[in-house]
Image (cartoon, coloured by chain):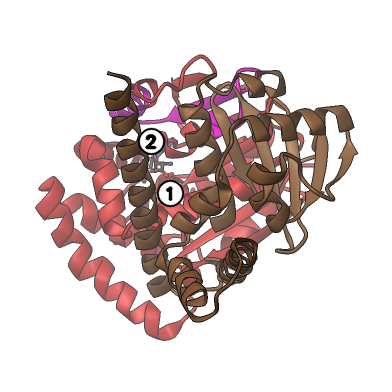
């Protein structure tokens, strides 16, 4: 599908495929150190609840091995590390070195060490053997990945049989009135806040646009099934501002 | 989710403040317990690791032990030193060890949970106490009931079903109650250190 195209969406402005990877990297390079504050401001702290809900539903337990792909500054990694304990393992993988560095320092400061590995990886080519993880997550990351189908196939490959993928991502707002308000917020207010806090209007403009270009709930579910997942389902949170997609490998 | 967060916070704080640094929980490392509160109709999974306790709604596979009890029994734990009427499944000796460890923390569940649930309960309990001259036990029962109602309400209002507005309120509420609890603990710690000097 998108492979046939010479250009690919970068937010709304179409850019050549190779450039997208570079551009996305640039976006996260420029926001890495302000990322956590921005997250809180942008979502009014609600992202914490979305993440908490995801963690609780994961069903994770001591001894499990977990891949937190596009793990960024490590919000999910931190909670997973506490839950899998010293007999388990969490791998935080992200394409951006600055994000990983901020995340690693933050987690070590909070006493999370010994059961977490950090690695710089592109979601489209995971450097892990087949059947490695009990759980894989990609939170607010998939929309930035150029070839999403490839990333989903890779995620399927590295999961153990019985393993579960959780994709937490902005999605299509189901409530019409809210959808309007949300659009206004994303396109008018969010970039301004980005400028105010991170002095980086362009990056947050990109975030807003990339949210709009991301596949809706049913499309993403189908993409997961096409990538090989044996079962897929989704759950809307906050009226579909965010959706949690779950896929299982049998 | 709210109840799980509250349980997690209270247990970790209690372990942090425990004189023995939660030594009673050491043998429970990497064990999982399922705690069912029948009167609330809730099931929580408690995971003990070297990092402390985590509480969650779902669990892959079975817990090492299951404890079926009630919020009322949990609230009464400091007085009774046992979970009255609790039923254990799975590794029963392990379940007993868990209850003993819980007991060793001497948590005033009622006080902490009512901080968590905010002024609402304090108001209701205070009101009940003023209007009817009740026995201490009666008030305790009342507190348990109010709390039960409140938590039931919170549990029904799961994020997926509620609106963004409601989320904001809940976030503010959590922040406030966590702040309040932290302040209290800070004050307690301060008075403890001044007392020992
Ligand atoms: C919005 S952040 C989310 C971080 C974290 N998961 C969270 O929820 O807070 C998106 C992350 O995706 C990473 N990312 C973007 N494209 C990627 C790719 N192709 N492979 C791996 N990570 C990628 C970025 O570097 C960034 O850290």
The quadrant in which residue A194 appears is bottom left
Is A99 contained in the magenta span? Answer: yes
Where does residue A75 sit, x and y in percent of width and height?
A: 42, 38
The colour applied to the residues of chain A in this rendering is red
Residue at the image point whose x is 61% and y is 35% from the top: A154
Furthest residue in direction top, as rendered? A114
Please tell me in which quadrant of the rendered image residue B173 appears. Answer: bottom left
Q: Which mark is residue A84?
A: none
Q: Is the CB of mark 1 within 8 Å of ligand 1?
A: yes
Shown in brown, the chain is: B
Q: Label 1: few (<14), some or many (≥20) within 10 Å?
A: some
Q: Which residue is mark 1?
A: A140
Residue A234, picture quadrant: bottom right
Q: Are marks 1 and 2 in contact (CB under 8 Å)?
A: yes
Residue at horizontal 46 percent and vertical 76 percent from the top: B130
Q: Is mark 2 within 8 Å of ligand 1?
A: yes
On screen, residue B116 versus residue B107, left or right, reads left
Please give the range of residues in magenta.
Answer: A80-106
Q: Residue at x 14, y 46 (%)?
A: A198
State which image quarter holds ligand 1. top left
Q: Is residue A134 visible?
A: no
Q: Nearer the viewer, residue A214 or A40?
A: A40
């Amino acid at each position: 599908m998108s492979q046939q195209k010479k250009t690919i969406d970068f937010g709304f402005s179409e850019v050549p495929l190779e450039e997208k990877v570079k551009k996305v990297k640039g976006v996260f390079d420029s926001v890495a150190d302000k990322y956590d504050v921005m997250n809180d401001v942008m979502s009014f702290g609600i992202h914490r609840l979305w993440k908490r809900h995801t963690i609780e539903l994961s069903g994770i337990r001591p001894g499990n091995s977990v891949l937190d792909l596009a793990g960024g500054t490590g919000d999910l990694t931190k909670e997973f590390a506490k839950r899998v304990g010293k007999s388990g393992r969490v791998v935080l993988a992200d394409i951006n070195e600055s994000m990983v560095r901020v995340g690693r320092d933050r987690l070590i400061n909070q006493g999370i060490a010994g059961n977490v590995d950090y690695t710089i990886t592109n979601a489209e080519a995971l450097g892990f053997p087949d059947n490695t993880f009990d759980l894989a997550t990609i939170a607010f990351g998939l929309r930035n990945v150029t070839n999403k189908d490839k990333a989903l196939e890779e995620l399927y490959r590295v999961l153990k049989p019985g393993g579960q993928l959780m994709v937490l991502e902005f999605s299509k707002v189901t409530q019409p009135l809210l959808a309007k308000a949300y659009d206004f917020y994303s396109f008018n207010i969010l970039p301004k806040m980005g400028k105010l806090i991170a002095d980086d209007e362009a990056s947050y403009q990109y975030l807003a646009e990339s949210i709009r270009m991301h596949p809706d709930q049913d499309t993403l579910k189908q993409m997961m099934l096409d990538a090989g997942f044996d079962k897929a389902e989704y759950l809307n949170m906050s009226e579909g501002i965010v959706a949690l997609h779950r896929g299982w490998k049998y | 989710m709210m109840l799980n967060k509250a349980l997690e916070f209270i247990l970790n704080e209690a372990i942090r403040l425990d004189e023995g640094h939660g030594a009673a929980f050491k043998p429970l490392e990497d064990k999982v317990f399922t705690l069912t509160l029948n009167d609330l109709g809730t099931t929580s999974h408690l995971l003990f690791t070297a990092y402390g306790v985590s509480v969650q709604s779902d669990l892959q596979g079975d817990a090492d032990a299951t404890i079926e009890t009630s919020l009322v029994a949990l609230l009464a734990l400091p007085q009774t030193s046992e979970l009255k009427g609790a039923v254990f499944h799975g590794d029963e000796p392990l379940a007993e060890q868990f209850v003993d460890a819980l007991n060793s923390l001497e948590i005033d569940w009622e006080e902490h949970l009512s901080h968590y649930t905010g002024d609402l309960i304090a108001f209701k309990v205070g009101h009940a106490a003023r209007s009817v001259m009740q026995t201490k036990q009666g008030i305790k029962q009342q507190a348990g009931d109010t709390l039960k109602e409140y938590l039931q309400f919170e549990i029904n209002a799961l994020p997926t079903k509620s609106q963004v507005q409601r989320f904001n309120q809940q976030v503010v509420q959590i922040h406030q109650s966590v702040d309040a609890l932290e302040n209290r603990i800070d004050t307690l710690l301060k008075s403890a250190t001044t007392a020992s000097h």
